[in-house]
Amino acid sequence: MAEVINMPRLSDTMEEGTVASWLKKVGDKVEEGDILAEIETDKATMEFESFNEGTLLHIGIQEGETAKVDTLLAIIGDEGEDISGLLNGNTSQTKEAKEEKIEATTQEAPVSSSTEEVLSSNSEELPEGVIVVTMPRLSDTMEEGTVATWLKKTGDTVEEGDILAEIETDKATMEFESFQSGTLLYVGLEEGDSAKVDSLLAIIGPAGTDVSSIAKNFKMEGASTKKEVAPKLDTPKVETKPEAPKQQAQTSVSNSDSTSNSSGRLFVSPLAKKMAEEKGIQLNQVKGSGENGRIVKRDIENFIPSTTATVSTAKFVPTGQEDYDEVPNSNMRKAIAKNLAKSKFTAPHYYLNVEFDMENAIAFRAQYNSIPDVKISYNDMIIKACALALREHPQVNSQWFDDRMQLNNHVHIGVAVAVPDGLLVPVVKFANEQSLPQIGAAVREYAGKARNKKLSLDEMEGSTFTISNLGMFGIESFTSIINQPNSAILSVGAIIEKPVVKNGQVVAGNTMKLTLACDHRTVDGATGAQFLQTLKGYIENPVTMLV
């Protein structure tokens, strides 16, 4: 049975998309997981994969053409199948296909837009005005999402454009807005619950509509509860004997602004949660003074811990007891693990180590920062130097594909930023064209957004080279895994004061070690070495970056 593939919604704000290129042509065989096309959204150009198998029978949007979300993109079916009914607007085949998918309990639902109409179990269409909202694909690599916070509750009136929920993806926590108006009739996932893309998220429709049968018959693929557990700060876990009564469930703290515990709901503002984490305060010990008992900033500021309870509990803790806390892997942590493992085991890494003299760089920075209202870091200088060196060595600024190598003429440098859940890489676009203060301002802004999970997809995509700097932590040298599809990543260590030989004399000096990890498929050893020689010229004589 032929399947109609519509223009997908590949970002939370996407309203239309442009087909940048087709990776399949009419008549080609398509397997589940094959990349059908590259689609340009309002934020990035993303690969769109097929969730169906068969033959590509029809292409509805040609390369370079733009169409709104849910416009006919392609049709996949059996070779030689008659699709004239679908092309002429006859929807009977589409309806039958949807009915079969609702009735089949073992077949996975195809990708669709964030909201779509589905059929109830009795093969009749949904009541007028009722819309099933599914877990949206909010990033190009997103496979599942976690509901961090609901901004609407069952029974609330929803207007088009209202924020329904905050959803945690593998990259960030994003607001998900409604594209329909009506009443929120049903919520399919509670806060903290995770589910695969296209699983049932909510149902919107006219007030009073009975949607219980719709919710019951909608297949929710792979949903699971995933509440992150914060490590206990005061009381170690004590293993109980088999005959001992079960311990009460501990309070779970998720990345949203509300959490659940065994006795009910615990509401906490993001700022209060952050302050509690910094001060080592367990939220279940704090009494909230906000609406519905919500814990707010003043509650954390005024909190006085109870030392009596801690001491009395500690009396019964045996020494030498094995203890651990389990913290479920977040979507971001799982995505990082998947991408790094893929890079490490598919790209043949090799490493080049150098040590630069930093005397001139130290003097240059001090003089530059003497200008009023100007402050640059060594990291800003390294970014600028790399950007200029990459313009002279495009091979290092390249990307590998199975059938070609892409030498980028633009320089977009990713800057690794550590966050509680792992690592984010915001991108400084056209770094070679920016001044040192502009680079510094951009990096500071992105770092703040990264730590607050406010980075947009556009701010994290498109890097052509990556820099990872652990010098501020006192690390002298280290190696990094390439951030694909980049061909190289530079690891930057600390500036170390030590004896050096200059003009035959041993004198006090300052040096910095750097390691360039290269993909041998695109960057040969000599090419990487030449890049580092050029970089050395800029770092050891930073005034040349201003010429």
Image: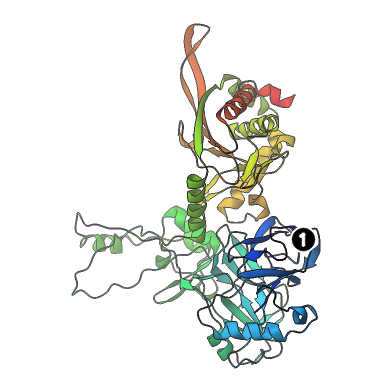
Let me know if residue 479 appears in the view.
yes
Residue at (54, 80) in percent of width and height: 219
- How many neighbours does mark 1 have within 10 angstroms: few (below 14), some (14-19), or many (20 or more)? many
Residue that numbered label 1 is attached to: 18
- The relative height of residue 272 versus residue 151 in the rendered view (above or below) is above
Q: In what element is the residue under mark 1?
A: strand
Residue 162, how many percent across, how many down? 69, 73
Identify the colour scheme used.
rainbow
Question: At x 48% / y 57%, what residue is drawn?
Answer: 334
Name the residue furthest front.
80
Q: In the depicted view, which residue is nearer to us: 101 or 443?
A: 101
> Is residue 535 shown above or below 215?
above
Quarter placement of the C terminus: top right
> The N terminus appears in which quarter of the rendering?
bottom right
**Between residues 252 and 407, which one lies in front from this camera angle?**
407
- Image-quadrant location for residue 7: bottom right
| Tag count | 1
Q: In this view, does 482 lie above or below 502?
A: below
- Name the one closer to the observer, 481 or 504: 481
Q: Position of residue 501 (x, y in %)?
A: 48, 11
In the drawing, does residue 318 fall left or right of residue 486?
left
Q: Is residue 62 left or right of residue 429?
A: right
- Between 519 and 418, the one nearer to me in the picture: 519
Q: Where is residue 44 in the image (x, y as percent from the top left)?
A: 70, 55
Identified by mark 1, the residue type is: Thr
Residue 400 in picture, x, y percent from top left: 62, 44
Q: Which residue is drawn at 65% across and 37% down?
A: 397
Instruction: Judge whether residue 155 can be spotted in this image.
Output: no
